[in-house]
Each structure stands twice: as C-alpha cells, then as structure tokens.
Image (cartoon, helix red, strand yellow):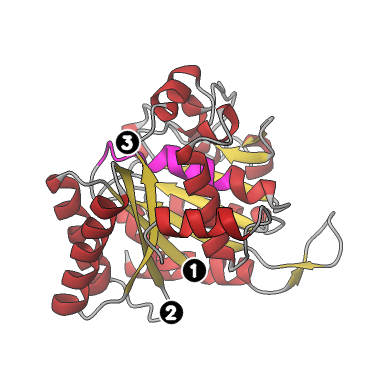
Amino acid sequence: MIDQAEDLRKMMKEMSGNEAVKGYGGHRKTRVITVSSGKGGVGKTNLAINLGIAYAQLGKRVVVMDADLGLANVNVCLGIIPKYNLFHLIKKQKTMKDIIIDTKYGIQIVAGASGFSKIANLSDAERDIFISELDTLSYADILIIDTGAGVGQNVLSFVVASDEVIIVTTPEPTAITDAYGIIKIIATEVNNPALELKLIVNRATSVIEGRKVAERVINIANQFLNVKVDNLGIIYEDIIIPQSVRKQMPFIINDPKAKASQCVKHIVSRLEGVEFKEGGGLKNFLAKMMGTK
C-alpha cells in the first residue's frame, strides 16, 4: 500500500505544480482537498459538495470526485444518474474524460462506483490505471475528494496524496471518538509532514457546542499524538439541510442565506484566506458564529 500511496502522492504533486494545461492556456495549480470522516452519517458528502459549489461561486474551476469506492452517493445528492462512473474507468472501459459530468451548479463531478463492493480495495493494476487518469483533472483549480468513511486502504492513499485533509465530525460521542481515531491513524501511518489536517464540526446546535467539540479533538490530538489540527469552524444544525437532501439539491443553492450556507461560505473564505465581500458586519457575525473570534 505504501508504494501505491506514494505513486498517488507523486501524481497529486504534479497536479499541484505549475504546468501548462491543454485547452485552458497559461498555467494552473490544482489544490487537492480530501474530505473524510471516522464514521459514516456525519454529513461528509453533503459538505464536500457544498464546499465545491462555494468555491465555484468564487470563480474557481472545481471537480468533486466521489472516491467512496463501493458506496458512492455524490451523484445521488445532486439528483444525477451517471451513465459511466469510476467502475468503468478502473476496468479500462472508459477514460476520466468520458466519465466526468458537468452540473448546473458550476462544478463537475466524477461519480463513484456505488454497488460494486469488489473494487472497494483496488488491485495494484487498477490503482495504476486510476492514478494515470488523474492527470486529466489537472485543469481544475480545486479538486475535492470525497472518501469513504473510516480508514481503509484507499482512504489512506488519498490522505497521503492530498495538500490538506478535512475531517468531519458531529457532536455525537461516537463521531468524536471516531474523528480522533482517524486522526491517530493518519498521524501514525502517513509520512507527510506537509499535510494539513483540519476539522469541521457539523450539525452543531450552538457556537459553544461546536467549539467544545473542536477543542476536545484538537487538544487530545496535540497532547497525545503531537499533531496539529486546525479548527475550520462549524456547520449549524439547520432544517434547510434535510429539506435539501430530500430535494436532491445542494443546500447552498436551495437557500444561500440559510445559516448552514453561510457557514460553508465562511469556511471556504478561511481556506482561501479571503474576506467576505458583504462587509465587516457580516464578517464579524460569521466569525463569532463559527467560534473563530
């Protein structure tokens, strides 16, 4: 697995380097962000999609890749039925250019292979095919990789290769424990000193609750693992989220002014190091709401 992960890291590094991109002119640098979680059901995929759309609203060219090989649902959240997915790519039936899908939300997606559990752990040959095809995504400004939950072989491969990893948790005790668990495994098994680990607390009912959860995970990781984890903030528990899921519509599109949507925009602004354009009042409000001031 180490050799395979190293190959993937090299490919991601090449994507992140300045290089001419056919068909787009000039040079681009692809920022690779992996979104992961210690357990399922914490809203990881929904968050990855909405983060991607928020980036697109900043004028970024975004690809969201569903790397949950075996239980994919990015396309389901968007109400898209793909003709081809990663299964066809890995089996050499289609190329990355064949399976990538444009959406009406300003992002492109690469659908995972839902229902094909046999490819959840790729063979050496299959991973080689996958790695070679990743180069065709180097035109993107942002590549968001939505991994499966937990710490399987493929998840760690993507973690090793990324510029940064966002761990998603909720205030539930099991989710907090599992978030620490995946951070511990990353700390002990991933040899990438440049890797940035970040934490988002989803479904927080208040700033205080979100801050307490984040501080607990971050302090324990620092004390027992000597690992720095940055607090990106919270996503409020918001009725717009389940409503949007039922509509198969991203909540940032369904209601851009909803609390959860504003949280996502603020998180992207922190990732990019830019200020909100709406003015100091909103910026300060969001900073307090996210527990960053």
Helix or strand or loop: what does disc 2 sit on? loop
Please name the amino acid that badge 3 sits on.
Answer: Lys
Residue 39, given in percent of the width and then of the height, sits at 23, 44
| Mark 2 crowd level (few <14, some 14–19, many ≥20, 10 Å Cα) | few
Q: Which mark identifies residue 163?
A: 1
Front residue (pair 30, 52): 52
Inspect the image, locate mark 1, and give the three-letter code of the amino acid beneath it: Asp
Residue interval drawn in magenta: 40-52
Q: Is residue 207 left or right of residue 146?
A: left
Q: Which residue is mark 3?
A: 118
Question: What's the distance in space between the residues labelled 1 and 2, CA to CA?
Answer: 8 Å
Percent coordinates x, y for residue 83 in the rendering: 59, 23
At label 2, the amino acid type is Ala
Would you call the spot at circle 3 few (<14 residues within 10 Å), some (14-19), or many (20 or more)? Answer: few
User: Of marks 3 and 1, which one's residue comes earlier in the chain?
Assistant: 3
Residue that carries the numbered disc 2 in the rendered image:
194
Query: In front: mark 3 or mark 1?
Result: 1
Earlier in the chain: of badge 3 and badge 2, it is 3
**Residue 81 covered by magenta stretch:** no
| Above or below 207: residue 231 | below
